[in-house]
Structures are given as C-alpha cells and as structure tokens.
Amino acid sequence: MRQFFKFVFASMLGTFLMGIVLIFIFIGMLAALGASLGSSKKMTTVKDGSVLQLTFDQAIVDRGAENDFDLDLGPFQGEKTIGLNHVLASLEHAKTDDHIEGIFLDLSFVSGGFATLKEIREKILEFKKESGKPVVAWAEMYSQGTYYVATAADAIYLQPKGELDYRGFQSESMFLKGMFEKLDIDIQFIRGSNNRFKSYGEMYTQDSMSAANELQIKMILDDFWADHRAAVAAKTGLEAARLDLIADSLMVRNDDAALELKLVDGLKYRDEVLADLKERMSLAADDDIAFVSLGKYTRSFTEKSTKSKDHVAIIYAEGGISSGDGEDGIGSTTLSATIREAREDSTVKAIVFRVNSPGGSGLASEVIWREVKLASEAKPVVVSMGNVAASGGYYISCPATKIYAEPTTITGSIGVFGMIPNMKGFFKNKLGITFDGTKTHKYADMMTVSRPLTAQEKRIIQGYVDDFYSGFVERVAEGRKLTHAQVDSIGQGRVWSGVDAKERGLVDELGGLEDAIKAAASLAGLTDYAKVELPKQEDFFKKLMKELNGDAQAWVAKEYLGEDMQLLEQYKRIRDVRNYSGIQARMPFDLVIQ
C-alpha cells in the first residue's frame, strides 16, 4: 500500500510541476504577444542618417500582413513572410525620406519568384536614380537570384572565399510512373484532345519529359536567362556572348574568378563593406551606421494621405484555386464576394486584380471569372500578374480591361485535365483487399478508384474535358478579342513567359504592380486617388492561432528533416492530388530560379 501511495504522489507531483511549467510558458506567450502587439501599433522612429537594410531570407508574398507581430517562442514564431507591397511602398517612401541615407542589400539568400525579384530590382533602380542615394550589395554567397537583385546596386561586394553561382538555369521534374507500377496503381490521366502541352499528368504517367513539355520549359528558361543576362550586362558592361561563355564554361569557380571576370566590384569582409558605405554617405570612420530593417521601416510611415474620396481597389488573389473559402489559397466564394464588393462600391473607381496563381478547380475559376467580367463591365479592371498566372490563374484574368505581366511571369497554360487513379491492383495484389457492390444505374460508380474506367467511361470524361477546354478558349477569345482558332493555336495547355505572351496577345503590357495601378487610375480618369487593399485581412487573434499552429508544424518538420524539406513538399504535392475534384485548370509544373 505504501508503494501504491508513493507512485500516486509522484504522479500528482509530476502533473503539478508540468502544470506550473505550462503556466509559465503561457504567461511567456502572453507577454511576448503583448509586447508584439504594442510594438506593432507603435510607429517606429527612424534616426537621422539611417540605412535601410534589406534582406530577403523569408518568403516574399504579394501582400504582407497589416498587423505584423514579432512573436518568438520556440517553435511559435510570428509570420515569416515579406510583403512585396511593403517592399515597394518602403522603397518609394525612402526616396524622399531625409532620414534614409542609403540602402544596404544584405543578400545571402532570397526566397521569391523571378517576377517578384524583377519588381524589387526595378524599384531599387528607380530609388537609386531618383534619390541619388547609394545602394551597396554584399553577400557571403550569391545565388543566381540574389545576384540578379544585387545588379541594381552601385557596388556588388563578395565575402573573401565566398561564392557566386553563375551557371545558367535548369528545371528538373520528378517522375513517379515507376513507383506507381511497383504499387500496381494505374493513373488514368485525361487531358484535352489537342492539349499536348498540358503536361501536369506526366509526372504520374511517364518516366521522362515529353518533347512538347521540354520545348515549352526550354523556351521559358531561355526567356528568363535573357532577362537575367541583360541585368548583369547592364551592371558589368559585359556583352551577352561573354556572359554566356562564362556560364557555359563554369568560369566562376571561386571568389578570385568572380572578381577577375568583373562580376563583382570587390572582395570585402562585412566591416570593410560598411566602411565603404560610410564613405559613400560621407560619414566619419568612427561613426556608427544606424540600420533599420524593412519590417521596422514599414511601420515608420503611412502612405501619403489624400482628400480624394476616389479609390483604386487592389484585390489580391494568390495561391491555388478551389471552391468555397479557400483557406490556403484562392476560394471562389470569398474572392467573388470581394470583387463584387469592389464593383458595387461607388467610391471604387477602378480595380487592380493582382493574380499570382497556378490555377486549380475549373469550376471555381468559372465562378470567379463571372465576377471579374461583371466588374470590368462596370469599371476599369486591370490585372497585374505576379510570378505565375497560368491555367485557372489566366482563366480568371482574361475578362479584364487590361492585363500587365512581367517578362518573367509564367502565364497561359490554357488547357484542362482530369485524373482518376485505378488502385484495384494495389488493393488486391499488395494488400489482399477486394471490392464488390451493387448500383442502381450504369454509371453510378464511374468515379471509383477500385476498378479501371471502361472505354465508354473514358470517352465520357474525355468529352467533359474537351467541352471545358472549348469553353476556356471561348472565354479567352471573348476577353482578348481573338478568334477561337487564334486562342487554340496558342493554347493547348502551353505555358508562356510574359514576353512571349505579350507577342501572342495574351497580355497587353509588360510591367509590375505599380504600373497596373497607374494604368487603372488613368483608365478611370483619376489624378488624385487613394489605394485600398482587399480582401480585408483576418482578425489578428484568429490569424495568430492559425500561424501558431502552422509554424509549430513547420518547426518540427524543419528540425527533423533539414534540407530534406523539399522532399516533404514533393510528397505534399502528390498527396494533394487526392483532393482534386472535377475538371482541373492547373499549371503542369513549378519553376523556381535559385
């Protein structure tokens, strides 16, 4: 009995102590949150002679959080993203801010699509030209993405013994046909009859790229490289042929080669770069530089106020397209409501529709398309395409009054597909599971995964896909003032870069978000207007709880997987196929430039 009570009291004591620890953790969270809330509401004060320090080591999204917070408690972190809108607004304000004397590009890593990086680079060039303030870039190692941004600086410095990656672009896809064959799973992929470029299903049904897919990806990579090469040429004065030779021969193999080839302006340690920056700012050698981060600088100002009651609404659509609320991307219900709200608001004179989406559900895209069309009939609607506005992303863009895209935007992919796995062999041969049942009508079980489609069922689904593709082509033809044949010739699921899309009439102008805003205001006849961003962002605490949950999962995954996180992302992509319902208008691949 004594032993029993001993264990009972030990258990009670352990529970009590754990409760105390949890209480302290909770108090710590509240304290961190309270401090964070206080700092987020409080305007940051920028000292005279400050330098705006830009690092892009967090994911760059189109729209940053309005209520940013700096929670830092183990796996529970505040939002780890950078808003492109905040970057552009900060650079615009810094041009005329007497407190800012220059910019320090601290570029060891960058996480953003090529079109996003182009907008940032162009804005830095504009800052430098209009303000006359110095911009210096430095990194321990330049990826091709960070180096692209660095070419906007007055001087590019590399850490001694550091690295500069300059070897051209490549795209690599994973193919799962062999795995599915070993598992006795047959992926029944059905695309439009002439959608030879709609290659989404290739990763499930082939063991290598088709000729059509290789052609379209190679063209995109060539266009991206041409833009990257032009940026490097403008900074270094080297000719295109010379830069191609440097990349093709892998001539940049160490820091000395990067300097000898004139790709960097010097090999300097961080303290030496800061000394150079002081000299450019005419500071004494013993003076300290007051750095201000992007996050803090964004909270130091508000955009110039105007008495005008006329608004240009900026509506953000980022992520995959699905029906409903779309918690992790674009939801047809919520986005349609936002567009409708802007259309019915008499103070909103024009709409800028920022689209950054690889597509998704065809039906959800149709729902959103209707609201964009109604809005464009009521007032100017200008689309600004981000890194990608393809397939369903292009579907929801095509009825706009005008479309802007960056040269490095991935767009087009006018095509659709359906995909149903036949898992009969897997269940029977691998697991010993069989299925049997009954039905009231012939096609009641047509979408089951427990048996293969019949020839007739395949023809029926092929008809669904072809009908939707024909409708997609008609939507584009109507919106872009092209014939059905013209759209079909550049459709067929083919993906284009922004520069190629403009040549083929899929977009009107090359430019970024700010260009689209100016165009929308001009079309509405506005010279004085206020900008309003939609949809309204989530309640702070609701967003916080979601962030805590997501960040805890990400923290655990990162702790245990490290660099193998990319494999997890591939798995998630495969897993998400289970959630696809109906005809899909989705881009066939992800393209990331490092």
Image: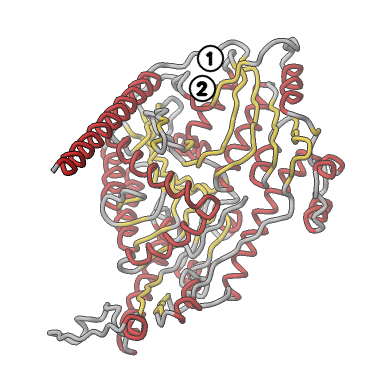
Q: Which residue position holds label 1?
A: 46
Q: Nearer the viewer, residue 28 or 160?
A: 28
Q: Quadrant of residue 180?
A: bottom left
Residue 174 visible in this rendered orientation of the protein: yes
Q: Is residue 54 above or below residue 417?
A: above
Residue 102 position, x and y percent, is 65, 21
- For image coordinates 23% across by 84% down, the residue present is 435
Residue 162 position, x and y percent, is 75, 40
Residue type at numbered disc 1: Val
Q: Residues within 10 Å of mark 2 (few under 14, many from 20)?
A: many
Disc 1 from disc 2: Cα separation: 7 Å
Q: Quadrant of residue 461?
A: bottom left
Q: Which residue position holds label 2?
A: 297
Colour treatment of the image:
secondary structure
Q: Residues within 10 Å of mark 1 (few under 14, many from 20)?
A: many
Residue 229 tag number: none
- For image coordinates 68% across by 49% down, the residue present is 227
136 left or right, relative to 471:
right
Q: Secondary structure at mark 2?
A: helix
Q: Pointer 1 and pointer 2: residues touching (CB < 8 Å)?
A: yes
Extreme-front residue of the structure: 2
Q: Earlier in the sequence, mark 1 or mark 2?
A: 1
Q: Secondary structure at mark 1?
A: loop
216 left or right, relative to 341:
right
Name the quadrant of the N terminus.
Answer: top left
Residue type at numbered disc 2: Tyr
Residue 558 position, x and y percent, is 48, 47
Residue 60 position, x and y percent, is 50, 41
Q: Quadrant of residue 268?
A: top right
